Every structure is written in structure tokens, then in C-alpha cells.
């Protein structure tokens, strides 16, 4: 049996790290194993005390030969736990078939390495098995079976995986989010009271930085499982502020053993065992305080911090909208108690997260009353956001859809916004009347193909040129496929624009003109940043994800370099 190398991630907890390494050194196979220690660097804002702890930790890991071979990788900059884990595990698995992963607050029993290596050998050819855990979640009842499978992993250290399994994990949160949406997978991302879908949304919006939630999601989408022992082969000493003081409590609470001999079992989830781990079941027998203790042992550290933050805040105001059917009119209370009318909950949630949570339009201006053009204003979220950012700003808001324009007008009036001019017109390269496909939400489309069918109305369109004869602080163009025509039309006046946002739409079986847009913007002196708001394809050579007739959507940000 080839022994898997061990990775230990450390940072600034020398005492925790010492306990972890001392316990590892006493493991039965430690004297035959290779250990890689990744030491993260100090944060830019680290205090003198924090830097001293980092230095103490680095001196400690060099004190002795903890395993047969020890390699230390010290980072000069702070990568954070998520990037450290992803980069470190990927690096070691590029040279090895499997790996065992520890963090600096995991104290292992003497038979931990033996169990992990034997289990890795037993299941190395099982594609559905993504890894092995050395930890047993607290269960409602004792588990008689020595090992079993769950559709979740124990991610706070003390797990093992193979290179072929790790390579199947997609750590791109936007792609994962799109897959969850396409497959209507949201309801399958709950484990008891833990909502991993909500955590994924926080990852996408930037409120959470977790490798674990991305791993969970990617594994779940592939119907993957982890192998667990019926008794823990490790304990975590880092649950409170100091960590070490939890040892006695954990020893009493956890069912710990030195070693379990793994036997090959069928790769399937036993529903009776699975039900024992649903956190909801605990509520029947124990207090909320004890449930929180249980959660500490289920969640990765960064997810535990997220859970705490979440429960310290009011419930997410968007929650009530998730179950609202599409194209059913409703209301939503924004910050400050103002109510906005919503014609479609699903599209509103996406726009709200982009505009108010991620703040993709946020910019700074020396002017207290910047001139802003909102092309494709929809129901007014961007205009409301701009007014929140710059109360004295002057805004022109274009929206051609009769139904949506009525909602826009109502929302602007209900917010009492001043110096906002609403123009019921679409943007084009000249003034004329065109057919407009009306989805009833945020997916309208100017149609120049008389063969298309659907819900159409005739709309007025006009050129943007007359509105660009002065300095424009921010030009937003979210105009559902008309962006190429408009950009070409206003090229000569782009020198007057300080910042530009273009939402690019690539439609199925239609010519792509992305290069043309980029060339015009670059020739006009803009520095560009481009990302995808969600619609992308993981394997485009095989198939393309399609939504609302689009096979790709990009956010293009143009700004002037100082």
C-alpha cells in the first residue's frame, strides 16, 4: 500500500499547531509518511502581535522531524484559507494519486493515518466516492455500521481525497450557480437546517470566501459521497477563541476511537443513517444552544463564521421572494422602508444582488451632481441605486417596454426621486419604430426579424448621440442585444464619457460582435474589465448553456486610467 502524503495548513496559532503536530507524530504510519506544511503569510493589516504569532508558528514547524519527510512551504503574502487549500491540495495532487489534509487545530488519534490510507486504497476506483473523513458527525442515534456514506464532506480538516476526484471539482462559483439554476437543484442543497444554496449565493456575491461551499456544491451536482467512520478518529481543538480549552468538552461529547478497520461496502446512502444526521432531528431532543455546538462540528470554519453572521442579522428579506411564481406582481421593501413594485421576483432577485449587494455600478466622482445615463432602466433599480450613491445626480432613464416603463414610473415617484428624466424609448442608431419582444421582466429584445413569433409591441427608438454632447460621468447600457448598434452609433462621442458599462448578449445562431464592441471601447481610450454575471458554459466544446435565447452574457466595464 502506497501511503498518501499529508498536508497541514498553518497560520498564526502556534499552540494549536503544536498539539496537531505532536498527535500526528504519534500516529502509527507517521514515520513512513511525507508531510507538507503550508504556512500562510501575514495580512497587510496584521498587527505586531499577529506577525509575532505567525513567526512563532513558523519556528515551531521547523523544530523537529514530525514525519519521515517534512517539506515546508512558506507564503510571503496572505492567501487566505480558501486559496491556500485550493492551491496546496492541487499542487500536491499534481504529483500524487491521493492526499490526506489537516488544519492546525486537528488532533488525530494514533490510528488515523492507518484508517485513511486503507480507506483510500479500498475506494480508489469508485468514481462516486470523492473522499474519506476521519470525523463522525454527531448523530441522533448510535451508528452500528463501522463506515457509511453521506452526500456531504467534513471540511474543517482530517479528510482525504484522490487526484481524480479533486480534478472533478469546479471552484468557479458563478458556473456552479448557473448549473444549480439550470437543473433546479436548489432544494437538494439542504442538509437539515443548513442551506448550502444560500451559502453559494453569498459566495457568488462576495460576502463569503469558502472553498468548502464550492466543493460541497460541485460534489452534490455530481451525486458524490464521502465515507465516514462510526466513531471519530480526531477532535477539533479550535472551536472557541483559544481553542485549547475545548479539549475536555469535545472529548466528552464526541465518540472517539483510536482506530477502525475499514471494510469495503456498497457505495450508497442508507436513508436510515442519513436521517440520523439531519440537524432538524436534534431540535426534538436538545436545546438551541446544543444545536449550535453540533453545527460547529459540521461546518468548515469560514462557513461557521458565515452561519454566525447570518443568525446575528435579521432574516434575509429576499427569502419571501424565492417562492413567488414568475411574472406575478409583488412588492419589496428596500433599505429605508421604501417599497418597490416588482413584476417578476426571479429577475428582481438577480438584479438586486448585482446592484445593491455586489454594487457592480459603484463609482466615485468629484462632482456632487454627476450626469448619469441609464440605458435599459427596467423597473428602476439602477436609477434608485445611483440616487442613493449621489442624491444630487442628474439621471436620464430610457425604458421602451410599455408595461415595465409604467412600473419604472411608479417606483421613481414612490421614492420621490428628483432630477430623474424618464424617456419611454429604446436606444438604436436612429429614430424609428421597431418591434419589441416583451418577456414581462428583464428580458425584452428589439426584433428586426419578421419571422420571429411571440409577444411583441411596437416601440419608439432613438439615437443616444444628442444626449452625449456634454460630459457623462456614467453611461449604463443594458439594452438586450442592441448594444452593438448603439456603440457603433455613438463612437464619435465616447470621448465625453468617463465610465461605461455594457451588458453584452450573445444570441444563439446570431453573429457575435464582441470584438467590434471591445475595439471601439479601447480605441476610445477605455481600460476594460470583463466578467460573466452567471450565464457561462463549463464544457462549451460539448454543449452551451442557453437562457432567454442567449448562449453567453458578459458585463463589460470601461474606465479611464488616471
Image (cartoon, rainbow, N blue to C red):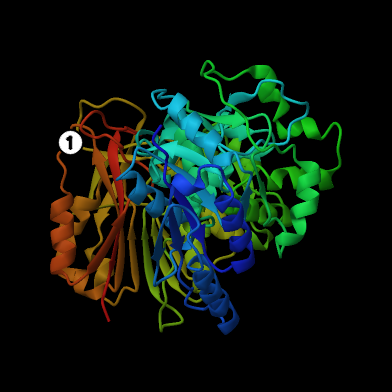
- Are there few (<14), some (14-19), or many (20+) residues within 10 Å of tag 1? few
| Residue occupying the point 46% across, 33% down | 219
| Residue occupying the point 42% across, 23% down | 126
Q: Is residue 504 left or right of residue 3?
A: left
| Residue occupying the point 68% across, 59% down | 337
The quadrant of the rendering that contains the C terminus is: bottom left
Q: Is residue 510 left or right of residue 427?
A: left
Q: Is residue 180 above or below residue 555?
A: above
Quadrant assignment, res 377: bottom left
Residue 184 at x, y = what percent? 49, 28
Which residue is disc 1 drawn over? Answer: 510
Q: Is residue 218 left or right of residue 187?
A: left
Residue 8 at x, y = what percent? 49, 54
Q: Is residue 433 above or below residue 259?
A: below
* Foreground of the two, 462 or 24: 24
Q: In the structure shown, which secondary structural element does the residue marked by tag 1 occupy?
A: loop
Quadrant assignment, res 193: top right
| Residue furthest out toward the top | 266
The quadrant of the rendering that contains the N terminus is: top left
Residue 291 at x, y = what percent? 78, 42
* Foreground of the two, 35 or 323: 35
Q: Is residue 62 above or below residue 162?
A: below
* Foreground of the two, 485 or 507: 507
Q: How many marks?
A: 1
Residue 77 at x, y = what percent? 41, 71
Q: Is any atom of residue 342 visible in this view? A: no
| Residue occupying the point 31% across, 73% down | 472
* Foreground of the two, 292 or 328: 292
Q: Is any atom of residue 534 visible in this view? A: yes
Amino acid at each position: 500500500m502506497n501511503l498518501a502524503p499529508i498536508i497541514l495548513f498553518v497560520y498564526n496559532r502556534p499552540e494549536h499547531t503544536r498539539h496537531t503536530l505532536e498527535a500526528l507524530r504519534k500516529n502509527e504510519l507517521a514515520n513512513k509518511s511525507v508531510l507538507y506544511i503550508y504556512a500562510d503569510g501575514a495580512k497587510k493589516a496584521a498587527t505586531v502581535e499577529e506577525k509575532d504569532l505567525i513567526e512563532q508558528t513558523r519556528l515551531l514547524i521547523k523544530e523537529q522531524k514530525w514525519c519521515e519527510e517534512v517539506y515546508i512551504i512558506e507564503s510571503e503574502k496572505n492567501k487566505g484559507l480558501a486559496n491556500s487549500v485550493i492551491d496546496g491540495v492541487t499542487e500536491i495532487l499534481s504529483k500524487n494519486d491521493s492526499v490526506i489534509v489537516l488544519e492546525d487545530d486537528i488532533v488525530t488519534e494514533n490510528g488515523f493515518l492507518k484508517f485513511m490510507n486503507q480507506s483510500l486504497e479500498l475506494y480508489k476506483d469508485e468514481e462516486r466516492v470523492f473522499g474519506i473523513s476521519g470525523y463522525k458527525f454527531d448523530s441522533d442515534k448510535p451508528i452500528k455500521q463501522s463506515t457509511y456514506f453521506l452526500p456531504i464532506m467534513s471540511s474543517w480538516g482530517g479528510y482525504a481525497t484522490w487526484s481524480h476526484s479533486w480534478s472533478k471539482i469546479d471552484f468557479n462559483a458563478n458556473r456552479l450557480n448557473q448549473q444549480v439554476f439550470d437543473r433546479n437543484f436548489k432544494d437538494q442543497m439542504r442538509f437539515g437546517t443548513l442551506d448550502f444554496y444560500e451559502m453559494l449565493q453569498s459566495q457568488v456575491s462576495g460576502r463569503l470566501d469558502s472553498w468548502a461551499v464550492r466543493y460541497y456544491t460541485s460534489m452534490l451536482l455530481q451525486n458524490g459521497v464521502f465515507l465516514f467512520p462510526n466513531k471519530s478518529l480526531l477532535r477539533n481543538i479550535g472551536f472557541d477563541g483559544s481553542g485549547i480549552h475545548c479539549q475536555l468538552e469535545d472529548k466528552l461529547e464526541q465518540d472517539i476511537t483510536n482506530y477502525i478497520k475499514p471494510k469495503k461496502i456498497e457505495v450508497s446512502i442508507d436513508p436510515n443513517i442519513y436521517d440520523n444526521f439531519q440537524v432538524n432531528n436534534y431540535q426534538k431532543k436538545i436545546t438551541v444552544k446544543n444545536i449550535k455546538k453540533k453545527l460547529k462540528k459540521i461546518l468548515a470554519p469560514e462557513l461557521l463564521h458565515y452561519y454566525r453572521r447570518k443568525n446575528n442579522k435579521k432574516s434575509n428579506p429576499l427569502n419571501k421572494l424565492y417562492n413567488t411564481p414568475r411574472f406575478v406582481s409583488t412588492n419589496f421593501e428596500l433599505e429605508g422602508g421604501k417599497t418597490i413594485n416588482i413584476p417578476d421576483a426571479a429577475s428582481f432577485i438577480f438584479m438586486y444582488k448585482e446592484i445593491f449587494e455586489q454594487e457592480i455600478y459603484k463609482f466615485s466622482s468629484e462632482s456632487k451632481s454627476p450626469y448619469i445615463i441609464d440605458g435599459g432602466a427596467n423597473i428602476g433599480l439602477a436609477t434608485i441605486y445611483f440616487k442613493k450613491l449621489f442624491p444630487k445626480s442628474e439621471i436620464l432613464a430610457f425604458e421602451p417596454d410599455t408595461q415595465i416603463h409604467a412600473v419604472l414610473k411608479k417606483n421613481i415617484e414612490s421614492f420621490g426621486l428628483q432630477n430623474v428624466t424618464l424617456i419611454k424609448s429604446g436606444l438604436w442608431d436612429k429614430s424609428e419604430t421597431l418591434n419589441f419582444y416583451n418577456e414581462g421582466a428583464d428580458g425584452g429584445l428589439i426584433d428586426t426579424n419578421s419571422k420571429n413569433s411571440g409577444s411583441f409591441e411596437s416601440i419608439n427608438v432613438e439615437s443616444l448621440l444628442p444626449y452625449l454632447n456634454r460630459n457623462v460621468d456614467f453611461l449604463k447600457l443594458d439594452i438586450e442585444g442592441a448594444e452593438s448598434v448603439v456603440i457603433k452609433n455613438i463612437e464619435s462621442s465616447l470621448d465625453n464619457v468617463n465610465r461605461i458599462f455594457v451588458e453584452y448578449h450573445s444570441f444563439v445562431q446570431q453573429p457575435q460582435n464582441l470584438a467590434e464592441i471591445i475595439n471601439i471601447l479601447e480605441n476610445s481610450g477605455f481600460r476594460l474589465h470583463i466578467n460573466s454575471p452567471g450565464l457561462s458554459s463549463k464544457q462549451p466544446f460539448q454543449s452551451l448553456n442557453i437562457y432567454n435565447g442567449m448562449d453567453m452574457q458578459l458585463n463589460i466595464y470601461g474606465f479611464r486610467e488616471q
